[in-house]
Amino acid sequence: MKRSTLILTLALALVGSATSVGFLQAAPKVVANAQTVAPNGRQLTKLGLTGAQLEQKHDGIWAVSLKGKALGYVINSTPFAANVQGYRGPVPVLVYVDNSGKCKKVYALPNNETPSFFDKAVTVQNQFKGKAAKKAATMSVDAVSGATFSSKALAANVKAALDAYSKYVK
């Protein structure tokens, strides 16, 4: 009896210490359950929505307004692109779609891609700017040479977010 109690105590101590130093946690840059966390002020500023208010409409989708005026929606790709992977894991994005249904801006969320390659890949985001969400969700996007995995994953995340917008908002 004492031996089993000792083993259990040691096992619990190991699990506790591993958790406290991060051994059992997800990759450090990726936010767990990012789809349920509303975009923060810094992220809204990156989307051109400084000071905007959010109202969650669906898991991963928020209506955006500023001083009572509806501006559009912000969509987090995380719940809609769960199987999409870059070279080193997920590459979630926030997509801002205005009231006219056009993709205004895309902002890449924290990820584990190699920064030098990812910096090249983010140029793929510009291919969506100004496009109608429904059309952009199905358009063909060119991958960036030298950052193929990252750029394809970014494009797939943006498309998934825009598809979710079409499905749950419009």
Image (cartoon, rainbow, N blue to C red):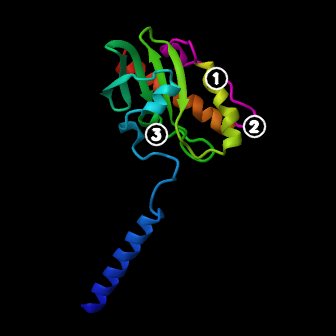
Mark 2: amino acid: Gly
Q: Magenta segment range?
A: 129-147
Question: Do the CB atoms of the residues marked 2 and 3 lie less than 8 Å apart?
Answer: no
Give above or below for 7 relative to 33. below
Q: Check residue 48 for magenta coloring.
A: no
- The residue pinned by badge 1 equals 141
* Front tag of 2 and 3: 2
Give above or below for 133 relative to 145. above
Chief secondary structure of the magenta span?
A: loop
Q: Residue at x 63, y 19 (%)?
A: 127
Question: Do the CB atoms of the residues marked 3 and 1 lie less than 8 Å apart?
Answer: no
Q: Circle 3: is it few (<14), some (14-19), or many (20+) Cα within 10 Å?
A: few
Q: Going from the N terminus, do you reach mark 2 or mark 3 first?
A: 3
Numbered mark located on residue 160 in the image: none
Q: Farthest residue in the top direction?
A: 100
Q: Residue 124 at x, y = what percent? A: 64, 26
Q: Is residue 100 visible?
A: yes
Q: Residue at x 43, y 27 (%)?
A: 75
- Left or right of residue 117, residue 47 in this image: left
> The C terminus is located in which quarter?
top left
Determine the secondary structure under disc 1.
loop
Determine the secondary structure under disc 3.
loop
Mark 1: amino acid: Val
> The N terminus is located in which quarter?
bottom left
Name the image quarter holding residue 148.
top right
- The residue pinned by badge 3 equals 82
Q: Circle 2: is it few (<14), some (14-19), or many (20+) Cα within 10 Å?
A: few
